[in-house]
Image: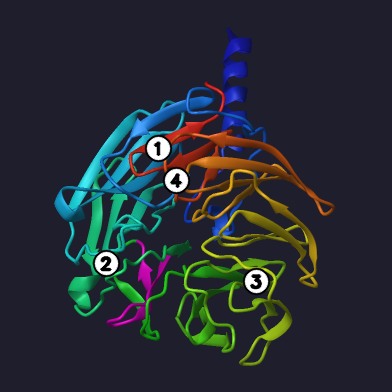
Amino acid sequence: MKFRLAFLILLSVVATIRAEDVTQFRGPGGLGISKETGLPTKWTADDGIRWKATLPGKGLSNPVIAGGRVYVTATAAYQQKREVVLCFDVKTGKKLWERQVWATGHTQAHPKTNMAAPTPMTDGERVYALFATGDLVAYDKDGDLAWYRSLVGDYPTVGNNVGMAASPALHGDTILICLENAGESFAVGIDKNTGLNRWRIERPRGINWVSPVVLPNGPHADVLFQGPTGIDAHDVVTGKKKWSAPGIRHGAYATLTVGDGVVYAPSSKFTALRPGKDAEAQIVWQSPKLSAGYCSPIAHGGLLYVVAGGGVVHCADAKTGDTLWTLRLTAGGSYAASPLLADGKLYVVNEAGVTSVVKVSRKDGELLAANPIGDTILASPVASDGAIFLRSDGALYCIGAKK
């Protein structure tokens, strides 16, 4: 009896260690990198699916995962007037709760996007969901309302008829949001415990879907905003401007990434820059050959991975920007979802729902499988609990061996 109890405890500990939390857009740090291993390589719509959960309406947000729970946002009702947060059990797919709020901002958008485009965040105790209407809501892990805020109620001119999609970031106790649109544009640091502003700064007006990214800086941290005037770094705690890169303008869609203290930014010329002690950052290299399209890049292990809109994967030397290899994915089609790097493999999903799995190294990229799921996928994949999670407008998929 004692041996059996000890064995069960050991299994529980191993499972806890194995399951990596996915706290925000593109996972830990917003980098598109997972430490998960033993992930599936091949599947179809009928084989290799651990579970599938029905969603009430459209959404482009990727799921976030912590404490054995999967959170995802969606839309509901006529003209997306209801905004939904759902919670599922990570192992079984059982719906634990569903909550809805009325949209306070307008719900007009391009047909390709919707009001559940921004990815929510979780710290394990709460889930924080921003919708493209400017509604921001926090629930605890059991679905009880912690607080709610209408940003468009506070700032009435905020609006984007094409559809806002920039996802917030979470660092410590601060929610970091950037709303750049045709109306009042700003970035704000919000106290996750109260929903109140800690700081707020003006941003250039204009449509922008680039999400903020946090750059660790010793005991401090900078939040990076890339917009039409370049890249600006601000202190996470105070909002004070630290440095800028005025020539590195956004590509409007793909979000920059960081690695080894270097910032890698999609722009008219893909740019690597190193933050300096002065007001401006130092450009390390630039390359016109690396086109990111909608897909945010990944920097890891001295390599840079960039997926072009037509399904061409570029691998470049992160120090020089020199292209090491290029691979055209056989699945073809269009690509809106950002890739995921896990266990030495890239997971790249096209809009037709085909996930290409590419084994990567400095030498080359090898296509291992192209997995159709028979559903439209624009949200970025994430990994946790030994599984790949995908979401479409109608369903949330957990792909992996059944437990």
Apparent side of residue 93 relative to residue 79 in the rendered image (left or right)? right
Whole-angstrom CA distance, mark 1 to mark 4, is 10 Å
Amino acid on which the number 4 mark rests in the picture: Ile
Query: Residue 82, how many percent across, how many down?
Result: 18, 51
**Residue shown at 27% from the left, 43% from the top:** 143
Q: Which residue is mark 4?
A: 377
Q: Are marks 1 and 4 in contact (CB under 8 Å)?
A: no
Q: Work out which quarter of the rendered image holds the N terminus and state it.
A: top right
Using the rendered view, name the quadrant where residue 112 is placed.
bottom left
Can residue 187 be found in the magenta stretch?
A: yes
Q: Nearer the viewer, residue 335 or 362?
A: 335
Query: Residue 183, how many percent across, how many down?
Result: 27, 82
Q: Which residue is mark 2?
A: 134
Amino acid on which the number 1 mark rests in the picture: Leu
Mark 1 residue element: strand
Which circle, 4 or 2, is nearer the viewer?
A: 4
